[in-house]
Amino acid sequence: MLILISIYIALLFIVLITYKIKNPYLQWFFILCPPLSLLILVWIPWDIGTTPIWIPAIIAVLFSLISILVKTVAALIRKGKRKKPTGPPLWIKLIRPVLVICIVIGAFTLVWLSLKSADVYAVEIARQIQNSCDVNSVCPEIIEGWKTSDREWVSCSIMYGKYGAKYPIRYKVSDDRCEFSIAVRHNIDERFYVTGGVNQELKAEYSVCGNSTTVDVNTLERIDSVENLPQWFFEDPMVF
């Protein structure tokens, strides 16, 4: 985390000295380097621990919007007064702020899509587990290919995300192996759960700060609020 913050500070310094550099090759490097470095956000999920990374990125977007407005207005004023433009052309001055906005918005979108892909993956795995429960009259202890755990509140887990950022997904089966749950950790306060078991229907719920909302398993659309999740798999929700 400290390394990433240090990188942000270094990039800010690069931005400040860009227009004092006369070498065109170095100037292009410093124009493109700061925004392209923001591509790392694609692999960083939203959470309280990643706030020091995402907040500077959002601030960079706001400053970029202001920069675009100021530079465009200044160029129009100079044109109206028929003054000779100073420094690089306007389109070169706008490359960096435009790239910053596009990359941060693109990264934000990919992180969101990756989160949704984790939810979809959890439902797909839950369907397979549900089928196994019905066929064998008992739910599997672990999921093949997932990392097993010695902790009582989780049988196995995996990190999944289709578009960059990865999210922890855990599987837990009840002591009698008649019920199971698959949980996707969105952030410190939010989870997505899929539950099922022998001769049961799959159910999906979002839990935010302990308040649960029913979700359509097929569309993942929220339906209505429900009571808290079963205690047998909700023993220690914050340690995940």
Image (cartoon, rainbow, N blue to C red):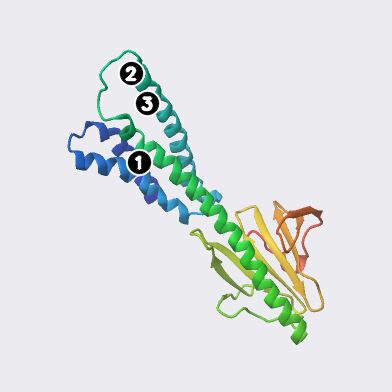
Under mark 1, the amino acid is: Ile
Q: Residue at x 45, y 40 (%)?
A: 101
Question: Which residue is under mark 2?
Answer: 79
The quadrant of the picture occupied by the C terminus is bottom right
For the question of whether residue 2 can be seen, the reply is no
Q: Residue farthest to the left?
A: 23
Residue 71: which numbered mark, if any?
Answer: 3
- Alpha carbon distance from label 2 to label 3: 12 Å
For the question of whether residue 190 can be seen, the reply is yes
Residue 9: which numbered mark, if any?
Answer: 1
Mark 3 residue element = helix
Q: Is residue 155 above or below residue 222?
A: below
Under mark 3, the amino acid is: Lys
Between marks 1 and 3 in the image, the one whose residue lies nearer the viewer: 3
Q: Is residue 236 above or below residue 135?
A: above
Q: Residue farthest to the top?
A: 81
In the image, is 200 to the left or to the right of 127?
right
Mark 2 residue element = helix
In the image, is 108 to the left or to the right of 5?
right
Q: Residues within 10 Å of mark 1 (few under 14, many from 20)?
A: few
